[in-house]
C-alpha cells in the first residue's frame, strides 16, 4: 500500500540567508584566526566615522546625528560583508591548495571579467598529477602551472611553443601556483591575471580563444592516426 501524502518525507528546507552567513562566518573563523579581527575592524571603522561626522557636522541636530549614525552602521555592515566574503574565499581556497585540480576550481568560480578559461587543464602529467591550465584575457594568453616549478617548467615551455606557433604576436605569460616561495597563492590567482598589461580588446580575446581551440578539445592534442573529419559513424546492425 502506498504511503499517503501526510507520511511522505518532506524535502529538507535550505537554510535561510542569515543562517548561511553564520555558517560562512563560522567556517572562516575556523580556518582564519585573523578573520574575526579584520571583520570587527571593518564594522567598527565606518560606524565610528558616522558617529564622528554626526558630532562634527550636526551637533545640535538630533535627527541629523541619528542619520549619520545609521549611515555609519549601514556602511559598517556593508564593509563587514565584503571582508567576510574575501576572507571566506581565502579560507576555502586554503583547504584545497596543493590538491590536483585546485587551479581549475579557481578558474571556474573566481575568474573576473576580461578573462576566459576552462577548469580542465591542457596538459596533465600522469605520474605527478602536475598540470598546465590556459586562460585568455586582456593580458594575452596566460599559462598556469599547477605544481612545483621544477616539474611544470618543461610543460609550460612546450605549451608556449605550441601557442606561439599559431599566435606569434600575442603575449604569453607564465603563472606558477605551487609550493615554491615565489609562486602565486591560490586565492591571489585572479588578481595575478588582472595585473598583466592589457593588450587585447574583447573581440580579439574571442578570436584568440577560438584560435587556441584549434589545438584540440580543451587544448589536448588529437591522438595520432585519428582524423575527426574522416571519422564515420558505426553502421546500424
Image: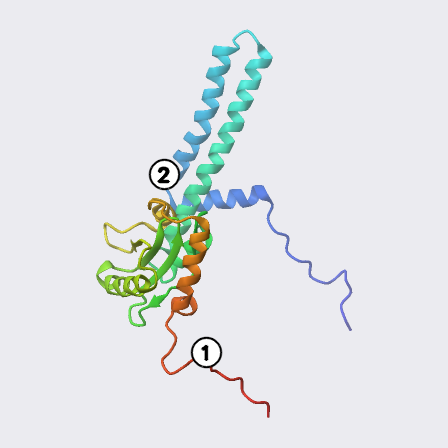
Query: On the rendered structure, is 65 left or right of 7?
Result: left
* 230 w.r.t. 21: above or below: below
* 81 w.r.t. 115: above or below: above
Mark 2 / mark 1, whichever is N-terminal: 2
User: Label 1: few (<14), some or many (≥20) within 10 Å?
Assistant: few
| Residue sticking out furthest to the bottom | 237
Pointer 1 residue:
228
Residue at the image point whose x is 42% and y is 53% from the top: 204
Q: CA distance from mark 2 to mark 1?
A: 54 Å
> Secondary structure under badge 2?
loop
Residue 141 position in % (x across, y down): 35, 55
Which numbered tag is attached to residue 42?
none
Residue 20 position in % (x across, y down): 54, 45
Which numbered tag is attached to residue 34?
2
**On the rendered image, what quadrant is the N terminus found in?**
bottom right
Residue at the image point whose x is 30% and y is 50% from the top: 184
Is residue 141 visible in the rendered image? The answer is yes
Callouts 2 and 1 close, C-beta under 8 Å = no
Q: Nearer the viewer, residue 1 or 167?
A: 167
> Secondary structure under badge 1?
loop
User: Label 2: few (<14), some or many (≥20) within 10 Å?
Assistant: few
Residue 233 position in % (x across, y down): 53, 84
Which mark is in front, 2 or 1?
A: 1
**On the rendered image, what quadrant is the C terminus found in?**
bottom right
**Colour approach in the figure:** rainbow
Count of labels shown?
Answer: 2
Amino acid at each position: 500500500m502506498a504511503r499517503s501524502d501526510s507520511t511522505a518525507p518532506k524535502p529538507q528546507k535550505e537554510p535561510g540567508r542569515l543562517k548561511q552567513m553564520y555558517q560562512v562566518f563560522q567556517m572562516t573563523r575556523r580556518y582564519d584566526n585573523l578573520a574575526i579581527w579584520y571583520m570587527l575592524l571593518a564594522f567598527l571603522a565606518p560606524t565610528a566615522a558616522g558617529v564622528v561626522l554626526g558630532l562634527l557636522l550636526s551637533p545640535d541636530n538630533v535627527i541629523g546625528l541619528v542619520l549619520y549614525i545609521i549611515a555609519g552602521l549601514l556602511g559598517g555592515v556593508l564593509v563587514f560583508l565584503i571582508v567576510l566574503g574575501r576572507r571566506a574565499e581565502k579560507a576555502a581556497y586554503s583547504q584545497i591548495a596543493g590538491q590536483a585540480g585546485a587551479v581549475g576550481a579557481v578558474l571556474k568560480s573566481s575568474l573576473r571579467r576580461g578573462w576566459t578559461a576552462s577548469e580542465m587543464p591542457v596538459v596533465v602529467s600522469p605520474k605527478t598529477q602536475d598540470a598546465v591550465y590556459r586562460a585568455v584575457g586582456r593580458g594575452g594568453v596566460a599559462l598556469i602551472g599547477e605544481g612545483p616549478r621544477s616539474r611544470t617548467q618543461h610543460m609550460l615551455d612546450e605549451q608556449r611553443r605550441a601557442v606561439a606557433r599559431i599566435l606569434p604576436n600575442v603575449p604569453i605569460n607564465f603563472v606558477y601556483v605551487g609550493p615554491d616561495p615565489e609562486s602565486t597563492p591560490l586565492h591571489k590567482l585572479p588578481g595575478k591575471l588582472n595585473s598583466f598589461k592589457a593588450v587585447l580588446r574583447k573581440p580579439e580575446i574571442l578570436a584568440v580563444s577560438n584560435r587556441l581551440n584549434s589545438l584540440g578539445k580543451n587544448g589536448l592534442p588529437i591522438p595520432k592516426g585519428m582524423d575527426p573529419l574522416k571519422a564515420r559513424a558505426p553502421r546500424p546492425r
